[in-house]
Image (spheres, rainbow, N blue to C red):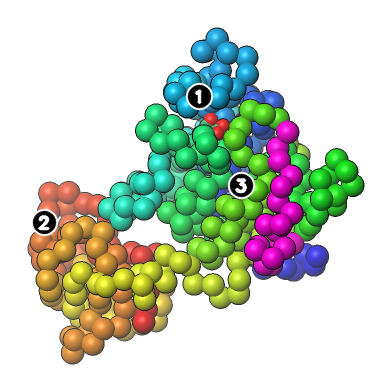
């Protein structure tokens, strides 16, 4: 496959999600995070932000429960995860300390991403961490949710995090060198590029991880790639233990398997914002804000807000209207209607003084806005 194709999809990534699975971390609990931290520090120097989605809590917690192998009952798995999670974070902390890097623990569930208010809460918190130069280490909150323990090893969670932070690429580390056209132990060869996941990837995704410490497999990685593609995000599945693999993937080397989203795919979330649901209210904006938003790529700031029609809560879907009351965009609001009325025309740095708190400097962030 041409290097150009890879560069096109991965070369300009400014924000990535890196998913690291249990089997890699169990094989090398200290060495693997150290090697990853080295590469992420290099990316940070180039202005690339990374969120790590790390499993491995169960694998690291088995010993604390007096177990040698992975139990089958869910409460024991959850108990192991609760024990192992602090060890997991200690390992990451130690790895990043070599670069004076800072990390943060973020525990999420799938429900956190499907509720609009919690989605925004998580998004704002992750954004604040990234802009402070901190590397968030995300895992599923296994005490209250069991989706990933049952069948994902965090692969789906990683795809959802791509949506949460509007990532440019998802990199999934695994213990084989990509997706194969048949079992690699029986002569299957690596497929470098997948352009149609349903047709080309799903039928050959049965190759599973052999380590037995995590719950994922190639099928779950392909499902995650499909989910990421629905948000318009390319995924590359690479052999995580190989030195320098992250930089190789991002600089377009022919490693692993690249899954590309269908051309011009509008993310399913943006589709939902723009066309799928009924707005709960309307925001009238001034001409300056209208013109700035029409150019594309901007957020709606309180300075451009003129009037708030109807009542709605934080995270609601609203229509953006010109002063002539023509709808031109839709988006999710960072504040409820009552608060927004107090913010009409104010500067972003005055939000705290007017409300007593600040969720974000935008009324509608550009990632949550669709022009009609
Ligand atoms: N959240 C779990 C962990 O970190 C998922 C991994 C698994 O299913 O084994 O251990």
- On whether ligand 1 comes within 8 Å of the CB at mark 3, the answer is no
Mark 2 residue element: helix
Residue 46: percent from the left, percent from the top? 59, 52
Q: Which residue is mark 1?
A: 73
Nearer to us: label 1 or label 2: 1
Residue 303 among magenta residues: no
Q: From the image, which quarter does the C terminus lie in?
A: bottom left
Q: Residue at x 49, y 54 (%)?
A: 162
Q: Which residues are magenta?
A: 193-210
Mark 1 residue element: loop
Residue 197 among magenta residues: yes
Mark before the other along the chain sequence, 2 or 3: 3
Q: Nearer the viewer, residue 108 or 31?
A: 108
Q: Which residue is mark 3?
A: 220
Residue 211: percent from the left, percent from the top? 70, 30
Residue 136: percent from the left, percent from the top? 46, 40
Nearer to us: label 1 or label 3: 1
Mark before the other along the chain sequence, 1 or 2: 1
- On whether ligand 1 comes within 8 Å of the CB at mark 1, the answer is no
Q: Which residue is mark 2?
A: 354
Q: From the image, which quarter does the N terminus lie in?
A: bottom right
Question: What is the CA distance from the residue labelled 1 to the residue labelled 2?
Answer: 51 Å
Residue sticking out furthest to the bottom:
324
Mark 3 residue element: helix
Q: Are marks 2 and 3 in contact (CB under 8 Å)?
A: no
Q: Is residue 56 left or right of residue 28?
A: left
Q: Is residue 256 left or right of residue 301?
A: right
* In the rendered image, the vertical position of residue 37 relative to residue 112, given as above or below: above
């Amino acid at each position: 496959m041409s290097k150009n194709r890879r560069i096109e999809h991965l070369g300009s990534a400014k924000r990535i999600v890196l998913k690291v699975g249990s089997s890699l971390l169990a094989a090398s609990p200290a060495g693997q995070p150290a090697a990853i931290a080295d590469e992420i520090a290099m990316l940070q120097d180039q202005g690339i932000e990374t969120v790590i989605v790390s499993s491995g809590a169960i694998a690291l917690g088995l010993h604390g429960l007096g177990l040698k192998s992975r139990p089958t009952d869910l409460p024991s798995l959850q108990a192991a995860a609760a024990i192992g999670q602090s060890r997991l974070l200690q390992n990451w902390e130690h790895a990043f300390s070599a670069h004076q890097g800072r990390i943060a623990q973020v525990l999420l569930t799938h429900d956190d991403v499907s509720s609009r208010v919690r989605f925004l809460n998580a998004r704002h918190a992750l954004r604040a961490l990234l802009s402070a130069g901190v590397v968030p280490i995300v895992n599923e909150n296994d005490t209250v949710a069991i989706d990933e323990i049952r069948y994902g090893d965090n692969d789906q969670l990683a795809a959802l995090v791509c949506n949460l932070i509007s990532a440019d690429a998802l990199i999934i580390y695994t213990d084989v060198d990509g997706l194969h056209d048949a079992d690699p132990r029986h002569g299957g060869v690596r497929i470098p590029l997948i352009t149609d996941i349903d047709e080309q990837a799903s039928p050959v995704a049965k190759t599973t991880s052999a380590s037995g410490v995590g719950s994922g497999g190639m099928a779950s990685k392909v499902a995650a790639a499909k989910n990421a593609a629905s948000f318009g995000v390319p995924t590359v599945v690479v052999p995580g233990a190989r030195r320098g693999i992250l930089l190789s993937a991002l600089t377009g080397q022919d490693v692993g398997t690249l899954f590309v989203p269908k051309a011009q795919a509008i993310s399913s979330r943006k589709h939902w914002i723009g066309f799928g649901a009924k707005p709960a209210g309307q925001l009238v904006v001034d001409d300056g804000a209208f013109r700035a938003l029409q150019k594309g790529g901007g957020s709606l700031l309180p300075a451009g807000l003129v009037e708030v029609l109807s009542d709605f809560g934080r995270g609601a879907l609203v229509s953006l209207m010109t002063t002539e009351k023509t709808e031109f965009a839709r988006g999710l609001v960072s504040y409820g209607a009552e608060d927004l009325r107090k913010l009409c025309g104010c500067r972003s740095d005055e939000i705290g003084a007017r409300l007593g708190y600040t969720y974000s400097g935008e009324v509608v962030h550009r990632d949550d806005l669709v022009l009609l």
